[in-house]
Amino acid sequence: MTKSQKVAADITALLRARNPLLWIVTREEARVEGYLVEAAGAAKYIARTWDVAAGACEIGGNPVRGFGDTQDPGAILQAISTVASRTSGEERVAWILRDLPVWLQGPGAAATLRSLRNLTRKLPGVPRNSSQAVIILSPNGDVPPELAGSATVIEWPLPDREEIGALLDAAYGAALSAAPDKIKPLNGLRDAAIDAAVGLSGEEAQACYAKSIVQSYCIDPLLIAQEKKRVVTREKVLEWIDPIPGGLDAVGGLDAMKVWLKQRTLAYSPQARAYGLPAPKGVLLVGVPGCGKSLTAKAVATAYGVPLLRFDIGALKSKFVGESEGNIRKARAVVEAIGRCVVWIDELEKALQGATSGSSDGGVSSDALGFILSWMQDRTSEAFFVATANDVSVLPPELLRKGRWDELFFVDLPTPTERVSVLSAALAAHGRRTTPINKEAVSKATSGFAGAEIAALVPEALFAAFADDGREVTTEDLINAAANVVPLGKTMSEKIGKLREWAKERARPATAKVAITEVGSNVRALDL
């Protein structure tokens, strides 16, 4: 049974229980009405519709006899009340009112509100054979306070995997029937195409499949996934970030963490679902600034082939009471709707500072902390969280316990081998993959450097080489650029030492064991 079928079954029960007013929150009017008609039929009701353009209509679109001009909202409510007052010879009707919410707002809404309130008081007690029910369709759940006690609010879910799969099969089947010689086979992409469309409305999914078919004569999951960017942009509570090319290969070093992350990609396959593997929750990356934590978050999305959403808690704060909390809840709803994605929370300790230090932000930080805790504990979607933090001392202990995250990694300053890897990735990013550079010499000259500091040497050296008659960059250019940098290993040596001490028994190292210890560099002290 799909999510929509479960909600429809609940509506059938509510109608049989004679609930007079159902407030359905959805943007998918056509799809939801189909389920409402079935739910009404199961409860022995006939479904009819009303809107300001067509008035009262049967499901087929024909006007309802005897209702006359009912484009006015007050007139349809009065007509329903009149039918409910009769004792015999009438049909049980569930009225689906499409446009009523706009007539329940503002100074001129008093008469319509009063008519609706009177109707909801009357309907539960009318005879069974003339029973009437009111179902209001609305894009939001802003029920007027006058109706709060009588309206049952139901948020209609977006199509789940089963519904999306049915839409995909219908679109592909229709295209195959129309042009069997042109349409390419799915070639095992059905699950990927379904995953790509989860989070879209039914109409959006159909439009994406149709666009993919007319453009490439096949179902292209990448094209469909791009439509999700429009959904996120529309809601304005999360930032869509384009994943970096190359995936985890673009991240220098951190081999132990990258192996762990790559293993988790297996959990999203159909075989893993059949085997019973749970969907990964996410990772918390703590450690030295500039050593690849944020870059890893971007690379994970590329490696997993899913959208990357940045959850900026500070940007959701508002000067209006209650709006910040509403934005956070909306962000959660968007993530739930998107389905498979990577949610990146950067510098978590700063975003949640008010939750632990008593900041006067109206409880927004505490709300955000509660959001993250409950999300990590009870979430149902396949979103993968990647949170980064530089100062773990201010994070609440309940956020760090095992079970909130699949793993907690400590990211330290890069080892000599990792510095070579970081330099190689930075050179490749600037089109210098094959340039002859003595990377070991540069690694030795950058002892105590953070990964970001090493990567920054490449454009600095390129500027110097370009200014010198546009020659090719050399090892000497990179070493000269390094000589002008005071590395993070020196400027933050005390803080880095405390981080390492904290991580000894609390976090998993992101770097595999190395076969060399840098003596006197105050960078790493390893027992090998």
Image (spheres, rainbow, N blue to C red):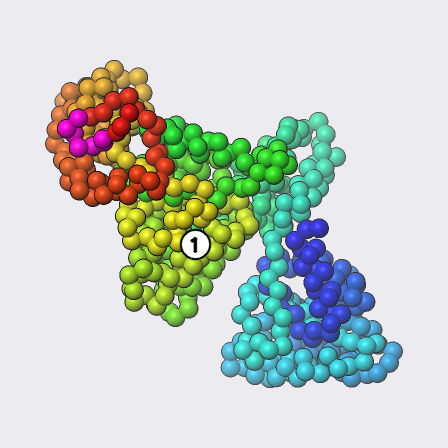
Disc 1 marks a residue whose amino acid type is: Ile
**Residue 62 placement, left or right of 113:** right
**Range of the magenta residues?**
519-525
Whole-percent x, y for residue 343 in the image: 44, 46
Q: Is residue 73 above or below residue 350?
A: below
Whole-percent x, y for residue 188 in the image: 63, 30
Residue designated by label 1: 372
Q: Of helix, strand and loop, which one carries label 1?
A: helix
Give 126 or 413, whichever is nearer the viewer: 413
Residue at image coords 41%, 62%: 367
Give 418 or 505, whichever is nearer the viewer: 505
Q: Is the residue marked by circle 1 packed among few (<14), some (14-19), or many (20+) residues within 10 Å?
A: some
Magenta span includes 225: no
**Residue 209 placement, left or right of 340:** right
Magenta span includes 522: yes
Report the residue that reaches farthest toward the right: 89
Residue at image coords 73%, 72%: 17
**The C terminus lies in which quarter of the figure?**
top left
Asked whether residue 194 is in view, the answer is yes
